[in-house]
Image: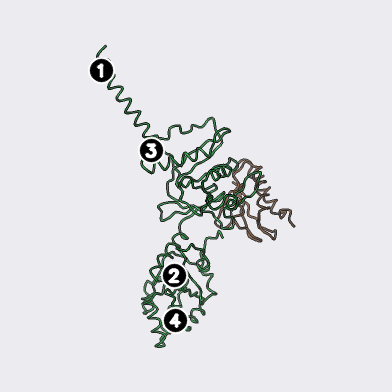
């Protein structure tokens, strides 16, 4: 956990929801399971099997589909396995056979010798390729961890940040009580998904949906509030930064100009929310979430308000001309 | 900014109790304090963060502090590790 390298074993032992299950099992070369997968790209080694090794993308996961498998079977039948020897001279991270094709024993033996893992999936090639690409894209996405609480409030992913002791967890607890969902407390892992948006989740499955509340200790949100109170991951759409009320600081009073913060190269709108006794932060955050939804639907309260004022002032001054004339 | 790398010498590693001790100590100081293991860097004032590091026996951790009382903070936290969190 927390290490930067992603091994074949990591891929094999990943936990998936039904729709993403890769249905992988290992049939040989187990000693090579610690090999690192260095790129999210895949390769179909058709040309390499046929003996053409120029520009061979050996450092990728090699997918053996129907065509490649048929060619392999032919090679074994005609006892031309020595042609394969060159393939195993490369440090290939692993072979994955689709359609539940089981390679010939001699092939497995060759792989065992160089510690190259052989995995099998029951999925079809196109299905497997699309699933594994999705999985690898997430694994290899640029990521960072942020100290804060990620909540889903009215469908908007809100990251609550702020110094230690400012009341992030307490705010989150109140939001949960009000029917919103906790994604992660304290350590939020954030990934950039294809450079388009940020996906936040808990950094560690073991910690899951636990929270630390000063005075209470560690509590289990899933057990206390049930499944309605939790979520595994959520897009980060808004950042609410809580800070101690600072009399000298100028806080945004209009909301016409939007402040934003850049995480992994993606801009996220940010609100600075001052905390002081008597200010109900959870309600402010709920309102911020609704306001953000309104903006997404094309209505910016602050801007519309200002537009109306401008229109009103204009009409007032237009009228003033007539009144001035009469006098 | 001050950094110090230490090795975890208590058998059980950093579980909930040692994590709480680190947080309590870190909160006595005004400096921003971080713990770094492999590529993960977390705030030393957060219990969950410290547990997430998954720091087991013999793993090494870098203590980083930044602020007015940085040297005292690093020293106090390093002391906890040296004392094996009063466990052994």
Asked whether the residues under marks 3 and 4 belong to the same chain, the reply is yes
State which mark lies toward you, 2 or 3: 3
Vertical order, A292 against A36 (above or below): above
Using the numbered discs, state the Cα–Cα distance from disc 2 to disc 3 in whole angstroms.
Answer: 48 Å
Using the numbered discs, state the Cα–Cα distance from disc 2 to disc 1 in whole angstroms.
Answer: 79 Å
Q: Name the secondary structure under disc 4.
A: helix
Q: Which of marks 3 and 4 is nearer the N terminus?
A: 4
Residue labelled with disc 2: A61
- Asked which quadrant contains residue A322, the reply is top left
Q: Are marks 1 and 3 in contact (CB under 8 Å)?
A: no
State which mark lies toward you, 4 or 1: 1
Residue labelled with disc 1: A322
Residue labelled with disc 3: A300
Q: Do the residues labelled 2 and 1 touch (CB within 8 Å)?
A: no
Q: In green, which chain?
A: A
Using the numbered discs, state the Cα–Cα distance from disc 4 to disc 2 in whole angstroms.
Answer: 18 Å
Residue A259 vs residue A27, the one in the foreground: A27
Vertical order, A105 against B4 (above or below): below
Q: Name the secondary structure under disc 1.
A: helix
- Asked which quadrant contains residue A327, the reply is top left
Residue B24 vs residue A229, the one in the foreground: A229
Q: In the figure, is residue A100 to the left or right of A145?
A: left
Using the numbered discs, state the Cα–Cα distance from disc 4 to disc 1 in whole angstroms.
Answer: 96 Å
Asked whether the residues under marks 4 and 1 belong to the same chain, the reply is yes
Q: In brown, which chain?
A: B
Using the numbered discs, state the Cα–Cα distance from disc 3 to disc 4 in whole angstroms.
Answer: 65 Å
- Chain containing mark 1: A
Q: Which of marks 2 and 3 is nearer the N terminus?
A: 2
Residue labelled with disc 4: A85
Residue A177 vs residue B20, the one in the foreground: A177
Residue A80 in the image: state x and y as whole percent: 40, 86
Q: In the figure, is residue A267 to the left or right of A214?
A: left
């Amino acid at each position: 956990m927390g290490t930067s390298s992603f091994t074949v074993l990591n891929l094999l032992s990943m936990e998936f929801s039904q729709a993403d299950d890769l249905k992988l099992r290992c049939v040989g070369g187990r000693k090579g399971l610690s090999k690192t997968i260095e790129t999210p790209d895949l390769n179909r080694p058709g040309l390499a099997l046929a003996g053409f090794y120029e520009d061979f993308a050996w450092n990728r996961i090699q997918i053996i589909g129907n065509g490649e498998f048929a060619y392999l079977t032919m090679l074994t039948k005609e006892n031309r396995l020595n042609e394969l020897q060159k393939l195993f001279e490369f440090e290939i991270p692993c072979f994955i056979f689709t359609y539940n094709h089981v390679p010939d024993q001699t092939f497995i033996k060759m792989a065992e010798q160089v510690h190259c893992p052989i995995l099998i999936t029951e999925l079809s090639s196109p299905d497997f390729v699309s699933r594994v690409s999705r999985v690898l894209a997430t694994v290899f996405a640029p990521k960072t961890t942020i100290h804060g609480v990620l909540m889903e409030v009215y469908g908007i992913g809100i990251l609550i940040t702020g110094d230690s002791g400012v009341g992030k967890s307490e705010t989150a607890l109140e939001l949960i009580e009000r029917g919103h969902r906790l994604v992660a407390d304290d350590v939020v892992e954030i990934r950039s998904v294809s450079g388009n948006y940020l996906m936040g989740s808990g950094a560690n499955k073991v910690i899951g949906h636990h929270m630390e509340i000063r005075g209470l200790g560690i509590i289990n949100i899933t057990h206390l509030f049930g499944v309605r109170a939790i979520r595994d991951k959520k897009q980060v759409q808004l950042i609410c930064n809580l800070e101690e009320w600072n009399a000298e600081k100028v806080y945004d009073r209009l909301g016409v100009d939007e402040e934003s913060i850049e995480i992994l190269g993606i801009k996220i709108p940010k609100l600075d929310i001052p905390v002081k006794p008597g200010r109900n932060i959870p309600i402010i955050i709920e309102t911020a979430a609704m306001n953000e939804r309104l903006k997404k639907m094309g209505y910016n309260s602050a801007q519309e308000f200002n537009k109306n004022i401008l229109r009103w002032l204009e009409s007032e001054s237009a009228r003033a001309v007539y009144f001035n004339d009469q006098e | 900014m001050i950094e110090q790398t230490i090795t975890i010498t208590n058998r059980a590693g950093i579980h909930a109790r040692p994590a709480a001790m680190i947080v309590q100590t870190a909160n006595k100081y005004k400096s921003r304090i971080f713990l770094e293991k492999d590529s993960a860097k977390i705030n030393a004032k957060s219990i969950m963060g410290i547990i997430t590091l998954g720091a087991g026996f013999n793993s090494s951790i870098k203590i980083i502090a930044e602020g007015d009382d940085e040297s005292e903070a690093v020293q106090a936290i390093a002391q906890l590790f040296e004392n094996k969190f009063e466990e052994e």
